[in-house]
Amino acid sequence: MLSANVSVVIALVLSLVGIGFVIYQMRRVLAEDQGNQTMREISYAIQVGAAAFLRREYTYIAVFVVVVALIVGAFINWQTALNFVVGALISASAGYLGMYVAVRANVRTAAAAARSLNDGLRVAFGSGSVMGMAVVSFGLLGLSTMFLIFTGSDLVSEISFLAGFGFGASSIALFARVGGGIYTKAADVGADLVGKVEAGIPEDDARNPAVIADNVGDNVGDVAGMGADLFESYVGSIIAASALGVTMKIMGGNTEGFVGLPFLIAGGGIIASLIGTFLVKTEENATQEQLLATLRRSVWGASGIVLVISALAVLLSGVNFNFFMAILTGLIAGNAIAFFTEYYTSYTNKPTRSIAEATETGPATTIIQGIAVGMNSTAAPVLIIAVAMLAALWFGWQATPAEVLLTNPNAAVTAGLYAVALAGVGMLSTLGVTLATDAYGPVADNAGGIAEMSHLPPEVRERTDALDSLGNTTAATGKGFAIGSAVLTALALLAAYMDTAVIESLNVLTPTVLPGLLIGAMLPFLFTALTMTAVGKAAKEIVLEVRRECKEIPGIMEGESKPDYARAVDISTRSALREMIIPGVLAVATPVVAGFLLGKEGLAGLLVGSIASGFLLAVMMANAGGAWDNAKKWIETGEMGGKGSAAHKAAVVGDTVGDPFKDTSGPSLNILIKLMSIVSLVFASAFGAGLLGF
Amino acid sequence: MLSANVSVVIALVLSLVGIGFVIYQMRRVLAEDQGNQTMREISYAIQVGAAAFLRREYTYIAVFVVVVALIVGAFINWQTALNFVVGALISASAGYLGMYVAVRANVRTAAAAARSLNDGLRVAFGSGSVMGMAVVSFGLLGLSTMFLIFTGSDLVSEISFLAGFGFGASSIALFARVGGGIYTKAADVGADLVGKVEAGIPEDDARNPAVIADNVGDNVGDVAGMGADLFESYVGSIIAASALGVTMKIMGGNTEGFVGLPFLIAGGGIIASLIGTFLVKTEENATQEQLLATLRRSVWGASGIVLVISALAVLLSGVNFNFFMAILTGLIAGNAIAFFTEYYTSYTNKPTRSIAEATETGPATTIIQGIAVGMNSTAAPVLIIAVAMLAALWFGWQATPAEVLLTNPNAAVTAGLYAVALAGVGMLSTLGVTLATDAYGPVADNAGGIAEMSHLPPEVRERTDALDSLGNTTAATGKGFAIGSAVLTALALLAAYMDTAVIESLNVLTPTVLPGLLIGAMLPFLFTALTMTAVGKAAKEIVLEVRRECKEIPGIMEGESKPDYARAVDISTRSALREMIIPGVLAVATPVVAGFLLGKEGLAGLLVGSIASGFLLAVMMANAGGAWDNAKKWIETGEMGGKGSAAHKAAVVGDTVGDPFKDTSGPSLNILIKLMSIVSLVFASAFGAGLLGF
């Protein structure tokens, strides 16, 4: 029977092993050949642009962090405020490190791909694994350290302080996802609209003034944004499970094992992910299928290992073995959602093909079919999550001793909610490797851009395209895990909030709950509207700048003079960050305002509503966007008339609509629902009946 | 202090007055001049097509009604089954009558518009008022009669039987809305795609084989479908309020007044609506603004009258005067939602103009901006409904005597829910006239088609277009009321269900509730996906038929031979009805299956989830569709390059996407959420803990 402190120390040691791997892997990647002078110059421009964006983004966020820390310190306690700052700092560091490597790995991947496909994969995946392992190791290290620092306090307080850590991570995640998401899509649209459509130059052409901004966008959106997103999922799931572990005191025994178990699983997951990354081995001249198989082997291998470690952790923690079943449920559910995500968004299957077929009758039917596919695709994940929750709740019930149930029938629900939280931890335990298979995609994408701009032989671009398309498939898996874990974590945080706010039973017929629920369900819609229009506004400014440069700088189109890349980067940065503020503040402020107006129960209703509708919109938008993207890619393989046909033009419209769906608004919703839950948890003790509660 | 029976008898008498008006008005409309021979022939073809559709639709529905009646009779009781059949029959009759007049009023409106704009308005509005008054009078007559038939039973049973009536009405509404909605959009798309785009002939051209089907569609979708939709809203709100009236026994006094009050308000609303229709008086040469003003005067006049009558009814029923405030709240909330609906969808305001401006950068930005506007527009209605609910709950609390609160603190919630239901009744009390201002639009639209096809002078088309565009504005008001009342009614039905199923407090942390809630939130998405793809499939068949006719029948394009209109109508009918079945069965079967699997509490969670997400999707889709439509119309006034410009083409794409949003999927969601609630209410007594409940 390990005490919570011992479990956390074990987790801390394992996270240090992970950090060792990050340093080793980073050195390996950075030691790779950087290619010729042109390539280096382009890569350098991207590095400068990305660093400028992050620097300015972090300046904005720093202001926010200081203000919020003061508020939290004043109204809650200084320990939570400190945790908030540390959580924000560590999340920002993990994002910075991931991007630091990514913007340097792109040119190295291009150079390696010039040698062979496998060399390209090795470098790109190496950089992805730095990101993946950095996120989990930094997250677990930070959580463990903060837990141990306050070890003098009682267990309840220790854990409640950690909510601040989660809040800090969530704040960074939201701003990074929204800001990065706006940037990447605005630059993309700007580059495409003027470059491809108006000037008729190909993608990734050095004559396009927005081409560097476009490549920077892949890094700040898909690397830094996604890293921060999953960082907060990861720490959020651990915090929620540990917080609910404290409520397990009703089981009669001590709660140490319940609190420590999530840390042990997370630590085991780091080792499992580490072994998983080493399973990525490819033969020379491997086919696309073989590459996919090796990535799958690494993910599944890690899952197998984490299961064994979890079983051991459950035994060591001295908790009932039914909780192991809950972890298993989480892992299965994550994989099942990933399977359906791929089914709905891959062009080898019917749904995406139905969109491609709808292009025949023009853009309108393409859009209608895409939205229908997106909406249809919500059924499977919802049913999977519902079944997983029912299963976890059942295991929790099974784990409750009969004598406890006799005196406290609610104990089964408490145990069940803890099991739901563990399922979320289980789902994310292999994040180190699943994120690696996801995060290498943008590196390969960038490598392709560099290959194009520096006029490398066409087979290099073909190889990076193969890697990129492989990345799109594995990214579908990553999205499945991200969405599934977001719901489970948000629900677990909701349960932790209700426990802290002392809401024993949330009756939907309480006067403030139904209005709260409706308002909560509306927030993801409003948030999506804000982020989608933000992309449009930012894109417009970039379009105007690109047009201006094309007109005012002579000789750009002839390739005789260089466009002012830096100015396009700067404008993208400014407009994306400006547009990030309103949705960000809305997300953080709403639960606080609602808590004071509607009271603690109305706020709980609001959270329930936002989780439900946010989950559905997130799945719908991510899958519709992915399906449009791949429908276009399918047509580009020569189907339906191929590139340049009317069908292809309609597919491009679908893809353009899908871009903010899948890369800006959809993923931000995952963060929104968790952020609102964790803000509520942090401020839980401050809310009473509410001004409008009666 | 009126007894429930006396109140219902008064309502019955008032409904007969309404029926008298319907007969009088129908004779007046049918006595109008029918125009020349060509016009009569075209109108006759539309009449035949519409009748054929309704006949076949009702055949399908008859099978469904018989099967369900047997199930209800076997598992619940024969009285509920009888109510179910009568509710279905009366709803079908009201829809049939409304359409019977509409397909005859179209040609008469065209002939009247040839004389003057005001004559056109008089005939079209006359036909709309037949529909509006038929819906409310038939509904109230049916409900009152069924109530009085079972007057020997106790009050609780009497009211519970009426749930069957609502179920019958909802079933017809769902099939009529979905079937009619698929038909109208499929025929529209089919006619446009081949006629306008491929063959290059103008809209409503007699050479287009789908032109009659297109005009039939306006009637079966926008007249019969909408009539059935609001019929069920109307009776649903009365049933829900009366059912909750029974729960008011906890107030200590007798419940007769609470049960009878909704009937009295509805009866008063019939008289108010009747007076309202007479307020529609226009001067010769009235401007568009003056026409709108007269329609508004009639709606507001009716609202004023209904308030006076309601105050009287509250006094006569002997209930606390705070309940009058709840009715007032409902009326204000309905008008407020209508105001915002118009704000977001009218091209005189910023949101719709922002879509028009987005057309400049092509169809993709047009779609993104439209979806953003739709999502943005959800905020106001949700906040209005939330505030209205809070207000109603507060009035309910105020109405609860202090001595009752002492012994039963839940009494305030019960009274509050009854007040919420009354707010819904108040919102719909003037339906007779609001529906009239809404239902005349399709008649004017049809009149325009007939004018075009029979080559009447262009000023006739201009006048019918003016009427049609006026109808679009008033339709926005109608939609506001429809959506707002749907939520309040669905919530009231949910409360009635919980009372019948003996769920005293629905705790969201009960193991089955959260999974139920997520599944419930998913259903509107799935349902929307099904109805949107149904439009696509049905449209495809029509496109193929129109293409075939254009190719195989010689001389069509030269106007030398007539296309086979009947065949296009027949194909539209068959495909629309076939596509109607799966979504319809899904809606009815899901609550029953969920009730048995998840148990009565899981089902309640499912209803909460479906109401929340269904409400939001319905608002989003209706407003996005309306805004796209009007953005296109704004461009057609000459803005952004006017008709034929690239901006206009992008706007057409938006409008085409918006068509199934606003005319098929969006409005069907209103019915879906109420239908699922009423199915649950009917079967409430049959559900227990559920197979998966533990």
Image (cartoon, coloured by chain):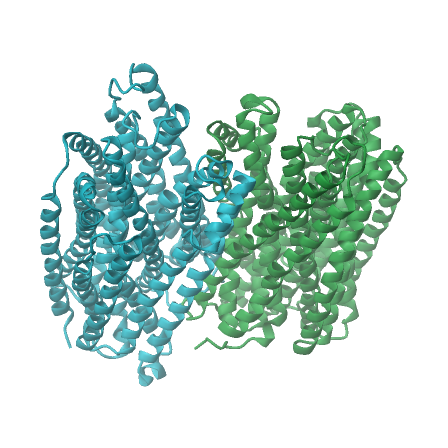
Chain colours: A green, B cyan
Residue B538 or residue A399, whichever sits in front: B538
Residue A176, given in percent of the width and then of the height, sits at 69, 54
Quadrant of the rendering where the C terminus of chain A is positioned: bottom left
Residue B683 or residue A512, whichever sits in front: A512
Q: Is residue A241 above or below residue A549?
A: below
Q: Quadrant of residue A238?
A: bottom right
Camera sees residue A3: no
Q: Quadrant of residue B544?
A: top left
Residue B15, given in percent of the width and then of the height, sits at 13, 59
Q: Residue furthest front?
A: B285
- Residue sitting at x 41%, y 65%: B384
Q: Is residue A604 above or below residue B478?
A: below
Q: How many marks?
A: 0
Task: Say left or right for A61 vs B595.
Answer: right
- Residue sitting at x 53%, y 31%: A650
Residue B350, given in percent of the width and then of the height, sits at 48, 55
Residue A539, given in percent of the width and then of the height, sits at 63, 46
Camera sees residue A252: yes
- Residue sitting at x 41%, y 39%: B532
Residue A482 or residue A124, whichever sits in front: A124
